[in-house]
Structures are given as C-alpha cells and as structure tokens.
Amino acid sequence: MTFLLLGLLAHVVADFVLQADSVVESKGRRMIGGYLRHGAIVFASSAVAFHLYGLGVAAVLALVVSAAHVAIDWLKNLAERGGAAGVNVGAGAGASASAGVSASASASASVSVSVGGSASARSRTSPRRSLLVFLADQCAHAAVLVAVWELADTYVGRLSDKVLWIYQGVLLQKTVPTLLPACAKLGISLNGVLVLMLAYVVVIFAGAVLVRLMLDAFSIGVEPRLATNAGRYIGMVERALMLTLVLVDALPSIAFVLTAKSLARFQELNDMRFAEYYLVGTLTSACIALGVGIVAGAVLPAL
C-alpha cells in the first residue's frame, strides 16, 4: 500500500502542482517539447517518491511511470481532437490558481485559463467532452500505478534498508528515534501520513481543476466585475477547511463555512447567472471535499 500511496501522491503533485501553464499549452498544441518537459516532471516526482525503495529501483520505476504518463497524455490529446480542434485538459500550478479554484470566486469564464490551453483553442473544444476526457485520463494514470504496484510488490517487496539507514543514522539521527515512539503511541503510520497528504493535495489542487471543468461543462460563467483575484485562493482554503472538518468528525461545522461564504456574496446572488455559477461551483467544491474526506476517514483506521 505504501508504494501505491507514494505513486499517487507523486502523480497528483506532478500533474496539478508542478505542471506550468506553458507545458499545458505546449501539450495542447501537440508539441513534443511539452510532453518531454512534463515527462521529466513526472519522472522526478516519481523518483523522489520511490527512492525509499532504493535509488536504482526508483529510477527504473519512475521511468516506467513517466513513459506511461506521457503516452496517456498523448492519447488524451488525440481523444479531444477527435471531437473538436482539441487541446490538452491538463492541470498545472497555474491551472490550479487561474482555473477558478472556488465556486465562490473563480476567474471569469471569459478569462483564458490553462486547464484547456488558450482561450481560442478551448472555444473549439466541447467542455463536456473535456470533462469526460479529463476523468478518463486520471483513471488511466491511476490504473498504471496500480499495475506498477502489483509488479513492484512482487519484485521489490519492502523499503531499502540502506536508504532507511541514511535517514535514521545520518540525516535525521536524532529526529527519527524521537518521532518513531511518539508516532507509534499516537497510532500514526507512514501510510496514514501519505493518505492525509494525498487527500489535501487532491482537494486543494485537483479540486480546483475539477470545479472549473464542471462550470465550463454547464457553460456557467460570470462577468469579470463579479470575480475577484482573492477568490481563487478562497476556494483552496474552503475545501481544505471542509476536509479538515470531515476528518475530525465535525460535519455540522461545514454549514458555518458555507453560510459565511454565502453572506459575503449575498448581494451578488440577486443576479441569477451568478447564483447558478455560485451554486454549481460551491456544491461541486463541497462534494469534492466531503467525498475525499469520507474516503480518507474510512481508510485511515485500517492502516
């Protein structure tokens, strides 16, 4: 399970945190440089994640994962072009910021966002097709990681004693011996920490892209004057807070978060178009946080 969690975390970080807008646009134009740059990011993040199994093993596994990742991205691009003058529905650091992170306040629909490449290219691509292709793309990446996990479980087995010795005996010779007994007493495991990290990264960054795609799929947007720059980050905080409330079993408190956000937008809700935009985005954002939180809360006790 540790291997799969490390792989999923590396994938989410590479796809939704480290991928720059320029890379997304290059892949959308089917430029080989964009695929190679993204493949290098995936390779680096995967190698860092898998280095606990040994540097040689990590390099081989990262190469397999990154090659499969680039191939899937290329197929995704072909699938989008099959329906229109398609572009890459990627997600990068800029995408998470400019993709309309929150329903309460995301960038205007008229503003160019990197989730689908340039504005002109996105206008020729069916938003609903982009949403479906995006979901299929992420499922394909997860399937590859599961397949690699099965092979790694057979041939790799466990974490490298040499790497662990470096951390325990050289780099963190005082910290690790102190933390391990405390973590054992509190019931905190490596897998538990990885699940929490994965949950927050998915909710904050991947959730931003999914909210934007949902709004685009329903052709919902607002005028630029109703969208604020700060709102891009309100969505991040909002989902992170809701996820935290779910994990600490404080579900009723989520109503307070939604109420506070509604009060801040009370006047704008008189605009029917903004009200639709607000409701679709808010409900999507809440569903992502609640869904991930419930799954993580169910998995944690079993680890």
Image (tube, helix red, strand yellow):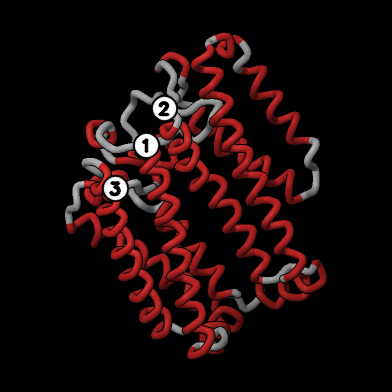
Marks 2 and 3, Cα distance to the nearest angstrom? 18 Å
Q: Residue at x 50, y 88 (%)?
A: 156
Task: Give the residue type that dot 1 points to.
Answer: Pro
Quarter of the image holding residue 55? bottom left
**Residue placed most toward the observer, 207 or 197:** 207
Task: Give the residue type that dot 3 points to.
Answer: Glu
- Secondary structure at badge 3 equals helix
**Residue placed most toward the observer, 216 or 183:** 216
What mark, if any, has residue 127 been given in the picture? 1
Q: Residue at x 51, y 17 (%)?
A: 274
Marks 1 and 3, Cα distance to the nearest angstrom? 10 Å
**Mark 2 — residue?**
219
Mark 1 vs 2: CB contact within 8 A: yes
Quarter of the image holding residue 269? top right
| Position of residue 122 in the picture relative to residue 204 (left or right) | left
Quadrant for the C terminus, please. bottom right
